[in-house]
């Protein structure tokens, strides 16, 4: 895509490369799981695994595995949503880095609120809008080809904003400045993210492998809290989900949906160099 003054969504060569990756991405671990109930999440899972899915008839094993992995990622999405605070049909919320739209559609399903999803992947935006149309909620859930660092939405337009595994694609100083602008005073911001553990030192080899695999840059834990403080986002809840996500990766590594990155995640989590956190903060 050529960047022009009329189309300033992708503001760097890096963002162009990320957009190209996600425009072309058709990984079965994302698409097959979403086919279970039409919620395409594009993130990882948490919770105890039902290991019995690996047993039983071979001809139905793949279906059992897909259903279980999707259940775990749905638990993750529901956990994030439960931290968004009280929401109702009158509220407007934003999914920053909305992927194929699973979390946005789930928030609308649970709370009835108006949702704007933002992504720099045009193919994902088109896919997500089609899912909203199929569910008959296109008047309430809309996906936009926009940059989460400069959305163009009005100041104070949103009661809640979230990032679900998308903060590692941007500079946090710019991201949280835009979120603080968009949130109403007292509004809620929530993210679930992998971050590297400052107590470990510099990023481990496994984290470098994850960065290279996804063309991202995993931030240190400390940067999240420093940049939130600098942008009037005051944490009210921090939940370490590291132990809760390891079973998801252990199951995925044993299935036909493994992509080759599973060992890096497991090494990073188990070594203590990598943490999986939920951070909820209020805009003050």
Image (tube, helix red, strand yellow):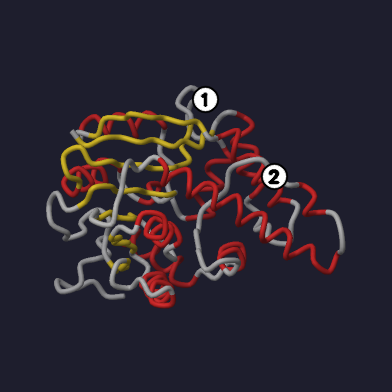
Q: Residue at x 25, y 40 (%)?
A: 173
Residue named by callout 2: 49
Q: Is residue 227 above or below residue 50?
A: above
Numbered disc 2: secondary structure: loop
Q: Position of residue 178 (x, y in %)?
A: 20, 48
Sequence-first tag of 1 and 2: 2
Give residue 210's position: percent from left, percent from top: 54, 48
Q: Which residue position holds label 1?
A: 200
Label 1 with label 2: CB-CB less than 8 Å: no
| Image quadrant in which the C terminus is located | top left
The answer to whether one can see residue 12 in this image is no
Which of 79/143 is in front? 79
**In the rendered view, does 195 fall on the left or right side of 188?**
right
Image position, residue 255 (x, y; %): 74, 57
- The dot on residue 27 is none
Residue 26 position (above or below residue 175): below
Q: Report crowding for label 1: few under 14, some 14 to 19, many 20 or more residues within 10 A (C-alpha).
A: few
Image check: 232 left or right of 27? left
**Residue located at (86% from left, 58% from top):** 56
Residue shown at the point (34%, 48%) measured from the top left: 162
Residue 148 can be seen in this image = yes
- The residue under the point 20% across, 72% down is 7
């Amino acid at each position: 895509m050529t960047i022009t003054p009329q189309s300033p969504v992708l503001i760097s060569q890096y963002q162009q490369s990320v957009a190209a990756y996600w425009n072309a991405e058709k990984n079965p671990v994302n698409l097959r799981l979403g086919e279970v109930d039409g919620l395409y999440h594009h993130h990882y899972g948490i919770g105890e695994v039902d290991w019995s899915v690996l047993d039983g008839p071979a001809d139905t094993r793949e279906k059992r595995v897909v259903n279980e992995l999707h259940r775990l990622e749905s638990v993750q999405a529901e956990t994030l949503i439960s931290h968004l605070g009280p929401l109702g049909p009158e509220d407007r919320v934003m999914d920053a880095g909305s992927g194929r739209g699973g979390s946005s559609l789930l928030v609308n399903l649970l709370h009835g609120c108006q949702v704007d999803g933002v992504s720099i992947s045009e193919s994902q935006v088109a896919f997500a809008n089609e899912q909203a149309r199929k569910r008959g909620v296109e008047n309430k859930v809309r996906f936009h080809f926009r940059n989460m660092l400069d959305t163009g939405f009005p100041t104070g337009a949103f009661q809640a904003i979230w990032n679900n595994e998308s903060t590692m694609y941007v500079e946090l100083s710019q991201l949280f400045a835009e979120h603080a602008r968009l949130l109403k005073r007292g509004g809620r911001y929530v993210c679930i993210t992998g971050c590297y553990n400052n107590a470990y030192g510099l990023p481990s080899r496994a984290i470098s492998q994850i960065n290279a695999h996804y063309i991202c840059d995993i931030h240190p834990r400390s940067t999240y809290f420093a940049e939130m403080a600098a942008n009037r986002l005051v944490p009210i809840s921090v939940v370490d989900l590291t132990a809760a996500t390891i079973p998801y990766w252990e199951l995925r590594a044993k299935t036909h949906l493994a992509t080759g990155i599973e060992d890096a995640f497991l090494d990073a989590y188990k070594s203590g160099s990598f943490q999986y956190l939920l951070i909820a903060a209020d805009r003050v």
